[in-house]
Image: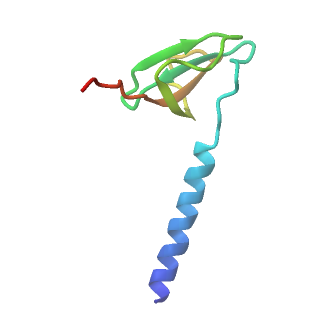
Amino acid sequence: MKRVLILLVISLALFGSALSFAQTKLPRRVPRGKTYVYLNANGKELARKRAGQSTRANGIIDCAQIPCPSTFGKDVVCWKCVERPVATRQ
């Protein structure tokens, strides 16, 4: 019983830290002096937004801020995102 309780506490702590990471939300517009780059799970660029542009992009959902590759400039903020599945006709 004690082991189950310990596992439960550990899993809740890990889940809570994952939620706090995922709660970083995109602002409505890209801040001045910044460029946002949206990447998929494989690191492929999905979209790029410049300062002042809306952060919304067609077909891109559920984004979390991640560290950018070293080849990107200091003014670039990277987001790992999920592409919305394309609706298929039946």
Q: Position of residue 43 (x, y in %)?
A: 40, 26
How many dots with numbers?
A: 0
- Residue 55 vertical position relative to residue 79 in the rendered view, above or below: above
The structure residue drawn at horizontal position 24% and vertical position 27%, both measured from the top left corner, is 90
Outermost left residue: 90
Q: Is residue 6 above or below residue 20?
A: below
Q: Relative to residue 67, is residue 31 drawn left or right? A: right
The coloring applied to the image is rainbow
Q: Residue at x 70, y 18 (%)?
A: 29
Q: Nearer the viewer, residue 61 or 20?
A: 61
Residue shown at 55% from the left, 25% from the top: 78
- Identify which residue, 80 or 69, lies in the foreground: 80
Residue 67 sits in quarter: top right
Q: Residue furthest front?
A: 90
Give left or right: position of 85 versus 14: left
State whether residue 87 is above or below residue 9.
Answer: above
User: Residue 17: x percent and y percent?
Assistant: 59, 55
List x then y, in percent, for residue 5.
51, 81
From this viewpoint, which residue is outermost toward the right? 32
The picture places residue 35, in percent across and down from the top left corner, at: 62, 14
Give the left or right position of residue 39, taking residue 51 as reference.
Answer: left
Q: Answer with the quarter of the image where residue 89 lies.
A: top left
Residue 76 against residue 6 in the figure, above or below: above
Give the side of residue 20 with respect to residue 70, left or right.
Answer: right
